[in-house]
Amino acid sequence: QVQLVESGGGLVQAGGSLRLSCAVSGSFFSISTMNWYRQAPGKQRELVSAITSAGTTNYADSVKGRFTISRDNAKNTVYLQMDSLKPEDTAVYYCNVIVLQATPRRYWGQGTQVTVSS
């Protein structure tokens, strides 16, 4: 079994910063892609950012230049540094990873609330 533990969410004023973390533990050979998704009330879950095992990153247009994804492979942890936050960034943020076991499998974190006040 694989567990994802997220932390770092909270309430921040517009223009502020938060750093999300997601630590992965359990039984697997390695971690492939690590992703951050978010879901705002009444909206579909959307991909915010992704990072491959080689360190290649991509971002949703809405967060480019403001968010930075990174990973620490030694700690099996992915981070999302969020700067210049806007009220429209308010959402539950979910960590999502693809791990290599007997076959590749996708796992989700429990989600962490990010609220940006205007």
Image (cartoon, rainbow, N blue to C red):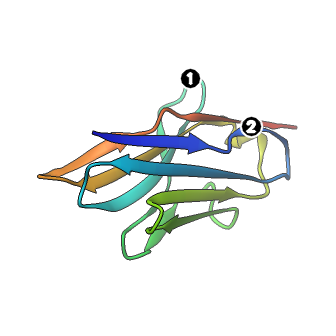
Residues packed near mark 2 inside 10 Å, few (<14), some (14 to 19) or many (20 plus): some
Q: Nearer the viewer, mark 2 or mark 1?
A: 2
Quadrant of the rendering where the C terminus is positioned: top right
Measure the C-alpha gap from mark 2 to mark 1: 20 Å
Position of 48 with respect to 108 (left or right) is: right
Up/down of 25 relative to 33, above or below:
above
| Label total for image | 2
Up/down of 67 relative to 95, above or below:
below
Mark 2 or 1, nearer chain start: 2
Say what amino acid the circle numbered 1 marks: Gly
> Which is nearer the eye, 101 or 47?
101
Residues packed near mark 1 inside 10 Å, few (<14), some (14 to 19) or many (20 plus): few
Position of 101 with respect to 62 (left or right) is: left
- Picture coordinates of residue 82, whole percent (x, y): 70, 56
Question: Quick one: SS at disc 2?
Answer: strand
User: Which residue is drawn at the image coordinates 44% and 59% (left, top)?
Assistant: 76
Residue 20 numbered tag: none
User: Which residue is drawn at the image coordinates 67% and 45% (left, top)?
Assistant: 8
Say what amino acid the circle numbered 2 marks: Gly
* Residue at which label 1 appears: 42
- Picture coordinates of residue 36, whole percent (x, y): 50, 50
**Residue that lies at the very extreme toward the top in this rendered image:** 42
> Which is nearer the eye, 37 or 46?
37
State which quadrant residue 69 falls in: bottom right
Quadrant of the rendering where the N terminus is positioned: top left
Residue 10 numbered tag: 2
- Picture coordinates of residue 97, whole percent (x, y): 37, 51
> Which is nearer the eye, 82 or 107?
107
State which quadrant residue 42 falls in: top right
> In the rendered image, is residue 60 in sight?
no
User: Which residue is drawn at the image coordinates 77% and 40% (left, top)?
Assistant: 87
